[in-house]
Amino acid sequence: MMQLSELKLVVASNLIKLRTGAGFTQAELGAKLNYSDKTISKWERGEAIPDAYVLTQLGEIFDVTVDNILSSHDSWQPIGAEEAEQEHSYSTDMIIAIAVLGVWTLALTAFVALWLVDMIRWEIFVVALPVSVLVYLILICSFNKRRHLQFVIAAFVLSVFVAMFLLLPGWPWQLFLVAALAEVIVFLSCNVQRRPHKPKKKAEPKAE
């Protein structure tokens, strides 16, 4: 049977792996759990262990079972884990950058091709803006790099409004007021946090 000290180290290793894999800082994970980053740091150093309710919350956040968090995984090597995570991060960042640049390369190719036949279509770049942001949004969600997700969603919403304003004749500028409200909704939605459920105290039986 695993001793408490060993269990703390297992949970610490798993928590570090899950948090860094999801792209969260200790402060961001703490905010989701309504704990300070110092508490998260204690868990990751193996000085303490989350209670049962917090373990359930962690399972929901990272889409794993509580048993997965409490179990040792031989494939997760603590030595060199940080370097491996950095290498994975660099690879995904490169894929995202290539994809976004690919959108703009296609847009520039189409613009030059039309320019050669005396057709100047600057609208191509207007369309490329929301498309490139959408590609970026899809890829960061696919790679679980959601640290700045709310800003990316807000940028996509704004780019759509800008594209419609520039491409559609007679598009009233007042609709940017709607865009501003949409931006507020995006930021509020991305910062919704579940509060810990506090069990109700059972009423003490009345003495007869």
Image: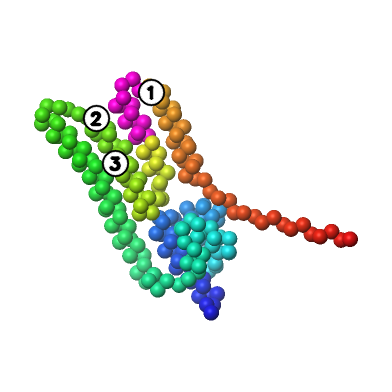
User: What residue type is disc 3 on?
Assistant: Ser
Instruction: Using the image as rendered, state which of residue 79 and residue 72 is in the foreground.
Output: 72
Whether residue 89 is in magenta: the answer is: no
Q: Is residue 120 above or below residue 133?
A: above
Comes first in the chain, label 3 or label 2? 2
- Residue 103 in the image: state x and y as whole percent: 24, 42
Distance (Cα) linking label 3 and label 2: 14 Å
| For marks 1 and 3 on the same chain, the one whose residue lies earlier in the sequence | 3
Check disc 2 and give the amino acid type. Glu
Picture coordinates of residue 138, whole percent (x, y) = 34, 47
Point out the stretch of residues depicted in magenta.
Answer: 158-171
Q: Which mark is residue 40?
A: none
Q: Nearer the viewer, residue 187 or 160?
A: 160
The residue located at (40%, 73%) in the rendering is 74
Which quadrant would residue 122 be assigned to in this image? Answer: top left
Mark seen at residue 132: 3
User: Residue, x 33% and y 26% (percent of image)?
Assistant: 165
Please state if 156 lies on the left or on the right of 5 as rendered: left
Residue ID for mark 2: 123
